[in-house]
Image (tube, rainbow, N blue to C red):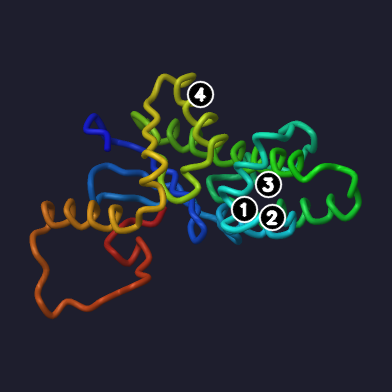
Amino acid sequence: EDPTLEFPLVVLLVSGGHTMLVEMQGHGDYRLLGRTIDDAAGEAFDKVARYLELGYPGGPAIDRAATEGDSGAVNFPRAMMDDGLNFSFSGLKTSVVNFVRKHPEVSSVDIAASFQQAVSDVLVHKAMKAARDVGATGVVLGGGVAANTQLRSDLQAACAADGIGAFLPGREMCTDNAAMIAAAGWHRLRALGPSRLDIGAFPSMPLVEAGIADG
């Protein structure tokens, strides 16, 4: 959506199936910097929303509930904040469940807001660290969780503080897989030309197997 992208960039990809940081030197030129070692952030949103009985999908449900809550009500853990560029969200999910069991008096909206803030803090902290490490001109946010209000606000503020760009897709584009695939295919076609007609199909090919460097 933004024609002003200048490389190198750091991509923060956050969805129900993926949470990763990728250095982008150009279209099709990627290097994996970090990833989740357990749950993806979007998966954690779904599980916490289900436990709080807020509905599904969990991302929008948590986002809506958080608007009525206090993000500082509960100090949930921020796992692996200063331990490289990998992520971990399973412990946070467990912490929320344990807290609810011990403190049923705390409102679900306060828990939702506090959980959401913990996730955003980790994602933004590591994205900014990655951007500084590689000298990125900006951070690109992608994936379904990119629609999250708190994450968008926090990332924009952090990038502004560091004097780099924050590139956020419109909310309607965050879950449009067809648009993402088409855009990636178009750039790949421009860079590499058409594939042979007998090319195989790989529905879940990892980035590193698509000719992209790992770490």
Q: Earlier in the sequence, mark 1 or mark 4?
A: 1
Disc on res. 173: none
Q: Earlier in the sequence, mark 4 or mark 3?
A: 3
- Does the residue at mark 2 contact the one at mark 1 (Cβ under 8 Å)? yes
Q: Amino acid at mark 1?
A: Phe
Q: Secondary structure at mark 3?
A: loop
- Which residue shows up at 56% across the image and 48% down it? 60
Q: Earlier in the sequence, mark 4 or mark 2?
A: 2
Q: Position of residue 187 (x, y in %)?
A: 18, 51
Q: Which mark lies nearer to you, 3 or 2? A: 2
Residue identified by numbered label 2: 48
Q: Position of residue 14 (x, y in %)?
A: 48, 50
Q: Which mark lies nearer to you, 4 or 3? A: 4
Q: CA distance from mark 3 to mark 2?
A: 16 Å
Looking at the image, residue 1 sits to the left or right of residue 175; the answer is left
Q: Amino acid at mark 3?
A: Ala
Q: Is residue 160 or residue 35 the one in the foreground?
A: 160
Q: CA distance from mark 4 to mark 3?
A: 22 Å
Q: CA distance from mark 4 to mark 2?
A: 26 Å
Residue identified by numbered label 4: 157
In the figure, 134 relative to 189: above or below?
Answer: above
Residue identified by numbered label 3: 79
* Picture quarter with the N terminus: top left
- Does the residue at mark 3 contact the one at mark 2 (Cβ under 8 Å)? no
Q: Position of residue 86 (x, y in %)?
A: 55, 50
Residue identified by numbered label 1: 45
Q: Position of residue 183 (x, y in %)?
A: 23, 51
Q: Quadrant of residue 42?
A: bottom right
- Does the residue at mark 4 contact the one at mark 3 (Cβ under 8 Å)? no
